[in-house]
Image: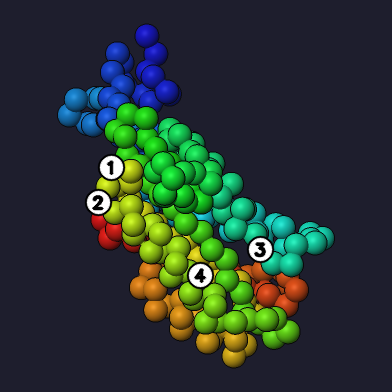
Amino acid sequence: MSAPLGIKGLKHAPLIMPDICGDANTLTADPATHVIREIYMSVQGLIEKGLRYAQADYVSIAERERFDVKPKEDQIKCALYRSFCEAGYLVHVEASYQRNRGRCDLYAVCGTSKTRVAIEIKTAWAGNGWTNKPGEQQSAWEADIQKIKGAEGTQWADSGYFILCFAYERGSAHEHRLRERMLGLGGQCMPAFALADWNGLNEAQFCLVNVFGD
């Protein structure tokens, strides 16, 4: 019998499937037992992977003719859907996760471990010629964070995240003013990436807030 999955020297090795969901693309072998084990990403790792998908999408879209005024948050939903589904999660977009109460942009559930993830997403913008309204934008972010926080400690969600996609005119005073508010969220800012001019917005950055702090 040939070695499974093309890994040499491993014959009749059982595949160990932990009772969790995760990124099933990476395999490693335990040298002592010759057992193949899957390495699984954390929930935050899957979100970051999805945001890399979204970044690639935004960069490609910006290079083509586009009619949307600014980057859409639905692109992030699609990218996260892809990342979580690849890891074996059931993903519900625009989900009601509590009867007559909780709703979030994306809700992902692992079928084996029952890990439940609630995510809210917002886009932000700052640039010359835009109606920036930084105070209103910040209020909208904080409302979404509070919405996710309301599920903490319940049976409906084990992890809660808020994602902000900040698109801006690089170096503008508007960028600096809104960036201060974004940094005030206390989240993890991923590296900024350049965009072909999108109605004056030429750079973007994701900020990821772990609302539950788990």
Sequence-first tag of 1 and 3: 3
Whole-percent x, y for residue 136 in the image: 54, 78
Confirm whether residue 83 shows in the render.
no
Label 3, label 4: how far apart the Cα atoms are: 17 Å
Three-letter residue code for mark 4:
Ala
* Residue, disc 2: 153
Q: Which mark is residue 71?
A: 3
Q: Which quadrant of the figure contains the C terminus?
A: bottom left
Q: Regarding mark 3 in the picture, which secondary structure is present there?
A: loop
Q: Are marks 2 and 4 in contact (CB under 8 Å)?
A: no
State left or right for residue 192 relative to residue 43.
right
Q: Regarding mark 2 in the picture, which secondary structure is present there?
A: loop
Q: Residue at x 80, y 61 (%)?
A: 67
Camera-nearest label, 3 or 2: 2
Whole-percent x, y for residue 123 in the image: 57, 66
Sequence-first tag of 1 and 4: 4
Q: Regarding mark 4 in the picture, which secondary structure is present there?
A: helix
Q: Quadrant of residue 14?
A: top left
Q: Residue at x 31, y 34 (%)?
A: 114
Camera-nearest label, 3 or 4: 4
Label 1, label 4: how far apart the Cα atoms are: 26 Å
* Residue, disc 4: 140
Label 3, label 2: how far apart the Cα atoms are: 33 Å
* 200 vs 135, nearest the viewer: 135
Sequence-first tag of 3 and 4: 3
Camera-nearest label, 1 or 3: 1
Three-letter residue code for mark 1:
Gln
Which residue is farthest top? 1
* Residue, disc 1: 155
